[in-house]
Amino acid sequence: MDQSPDRDEDDQHKKGRRSVRADDNRDGTRRNRIRGHALPRLLRRLRIPRFSHRQRTESNHSTEPTNSTDGQFRYDSDKPDSPLTEEEKRKQSFIEALKATYKLDYDRVQPIPYIKDRLYCVDKVYVEGGYEFMNSGDLEGGGSWRRLESYRSVFSDPQIQSNRRILEGEPGYGKTTCTLQLAYDWCNRVEGSPLRDVEILILLRLRQLRGVRSIYRAIQVYLLNSDTRIKEADIGAIIKESQSVVVILDGYDEFPGRDSKRENDVQRILKLELFQNVQVILTTRYLPDYLAPTTKRIRLTGFDELARVEYIRKAVVGVDDVEGIHSIRQRLKANPVLEDLCQVPLIFVMFAHIANEKEDFQNFRSVTEFFRYMITCFHEHLRNKTYESNVRRYVIPEDDHAALDQLAFSAISKEHQQITWNRREMYDQLGEDMYDTYLAIGVLREEDVILDNPSRNIEVRFYHKLFCEWYAANHIVNILSDTDQSVSSNDVFRHVDPEDLQYVYRFACGLNPDVGNSIIQYLTRSREGADRFAVLCMLERSGDVDDILGTVRDMCSQTVTMKKDDTRLLQRSTVQLLDIAAGNSIHVSCLYLDECFSKFDVTNACIVLKSNFLLINLKTVKVLRVEESKADIEVTREELMGLLQTCEGLEEIRFEGAEIYLPLSIPPEMIPPELKNRNLRVYYKCGLEYLLSIDDGQWKIDDRFADLSSSVRLDNEDDRWIIQQLEMAAEAGIPISCLHLDGCLSKFDVTNACIVLKSGHRLTNPKNVKVLRVSGRIRETVSDSKGIEVTREELLGLCQTCEILKEIR
């Protein structure tokens, strides 16, 4: 464990006596030489602050961390050095023990479960996926998700400053890996990290705290080694007296006490009853029932194409291996059925490593085929290792896993799914050979768990939820294909929700086509809106897209609607339906995005939905309709042009709603020639309906809307859409009979020739206003901040700017 220069000096001070003595020079003269560590004591006597080597090279870092107003942690400078008190020694010992524990964890990241001898430091393989935060609304929703620049922004972004933050993500999206990277940053004081100057970082895996009600005992037992003589009371005192503390609680959805009626410290922390002044981050798949109102929400959105390439470069083939990077990317493109699955970082990581190592890597027609191949690779690697001398031979055949199938199905078919097992319990159910085999290939993992007594317990879980779903699907196939058992699909799937366990259904359909038929019939008759998901199950069942093309054509001949309130399963199924259509040149008559459009990602050439699903393959969509009436959606010129070019078969696109903001015009040079030859129609409806002229980039308006005879009123409400309507009317040369500024005028900006409203919005093009009416109180005195004062210059500028102005009141 590396120690700072200050620490080395203090240790030597304890071991040896400091002295100042006179030594002879080679020339016979005498000089005083300060030897050893007398210098710090001498500096203290002279009241001169001492700096360590690190402090000399990194200016403005001090020895006591404090919270600053911008949410970052700072150190107070030039605090005089003094001997450590017993409390300070105890804190130092505590911090060293934490760092030793975290180092063991972040130094053994295992990208592929079956290759246990290939471990990495997290910093060598960590690649950021997408991060977003909810910028408004309550904890249950109502706001919009905005992108964060980095995982470090979770701490540093001022928009989400709070002592309670939730980091959400589906299984395999990298929540735990992110916490390990944060631990690495803290232990190594990484430059630029917001944790660099944090005094204490507490990182606990909640799934390991079975029956533990005290957070201090959890820290003592799990994070401190047995040689550290620090009591629970000491831990509480250290945290209370420290200037900056961050607590990360990883995996609330796996916390054994999450549904406990007996209150525990984790619940108290989330409700802000404990650690009120400590920054706490909770990672989870879903929101707990009890949260402080000030809690901020952040979510992980998985790997996009850039993140995938970065991982291949960083952890698979090397930065300079352009050919290797291209090869793995091509293998993914050759397997479009895996596109959705490989947005999950954990799955893509396994895909990338296997694709790089296996020369016989094949193209897969279904997710079932890929997963079967991956399991075979696990077993094959284990068999290859047993050929070495003095290595245990495993006798369980690859297709002998009935006991594991039954155990997995029992886990997912309960009202409350089981995610961990006591080692003895699983060992007895599977038998020694099967247990050891699946532990060796990496499908199962063992973990230490703290019990509320002096002992530790070892529990077992699947490496990832998908593996549990795979073996559960095998058991379902065995049940439903057994003619001797009169078991119905209703009985089997009573507690198997496709919203949470979609791959159980898809795997079962792919493993046995006859069973797949009965599952598809069950879905279509028992679940509303299950037709799109049923298409995916059909694809798994046949393994041949040609068998389902007729169904896909029928569905795409009608309007395909995606709504904000659609379940994630329905949205995911619709995304894959569009992928199948695009891959087989099936026209989508109309795609209607109802309150679910977020933006167009120019870099990745895809539509991003509010749910963070990506619509990548849109080349066969003929009509695209985007409607938004609640959340502000702004589409830039670059985004609009990118969208029009990406949708190659698009004939018409319609933007509808008061909260969509499009560019007022498109410079002609930004419009590529191929767009001008496509007879493409772009409509924008926000009160009036506009049509974009592809030739000159200007908005035109239908003749029936050419006269705005009624008065247009602006007040202190957020009438941004009205402002945009006025701007577009000006661009189209439509006169405004009367513009009423009702108590919202701030001033006229003479320099920029625009009207400035109290909301901060600007009306930059009022040239087509015939009558301008301004309501509001006139400023009576210089100190009157609420009244309106219009100078001579402003009035003159206003009259000159409004070119057809006939009257102003």
Image (tube, rainbow, N blue to C red):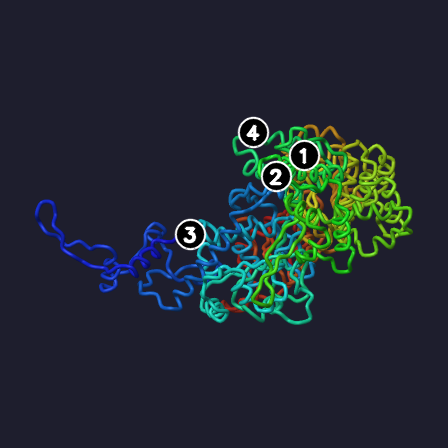
Of the pair 638 and 213, the residue shown nearer to us: 213
Check disc 2 and give the amino acid type.
Arg
Query: How many angstroms separate mark 4 from mark 1 (CA)?
Result: 16 Å
Mark 3, mark 4: which one is toward the viewer? 3
Quarter occupied by residue 548: top right
Query: How many angstroms separate mark 2 from mark 1 (CA)?
Result: 10 Å
- The circle drawn on residue 322 is 4
Q: Which residue is mark 1?
A: 332
Circle 1 packing at 10 Å, graded few (<14), some (14-19), many (20+), is some
Q: Position of residue 133 (x, y in %)?
A: 61, 54
3 or 4: tag closer to the N-terminus: 3
Query: How many angstroms separate mark 2 from mark 4 (CA)?
Result: 14 Å
Q: Which residue is mark 3?
A: 1
Number of numbered discs on residues: 4
Q: Position of residue 308 (x, y in %)?
A: 61, 39
Q: Position of residue 337 (x, y in %)?
A: 74, 37
Query: How many angstroms separate mark 3 from mark 1 (CA)?
Result: 41 Å
Check disc 1 and give the amino acid type.
Leu
Kind of element beneath mark 4: helix
4 or 1: tag closer to the N-terminus: 4
Of the pair 95 and 760, the residue shown nearer to us: 95
- The circle drawn on residue 308 is 2
Mark 3, mark 1: which one is toward the viewer? 3
Circle 3 packing at 10 Å, graded few (<14), some (14-19), many (20+), is few
Kind of element beneath mark 1: helix
**Contact flag, marks 2 and 1 (Cβ < 8 Å):** yes
Check disc 3 and give the amino acid type.
Met
Check disc 4 and give the amino acid type.
Val
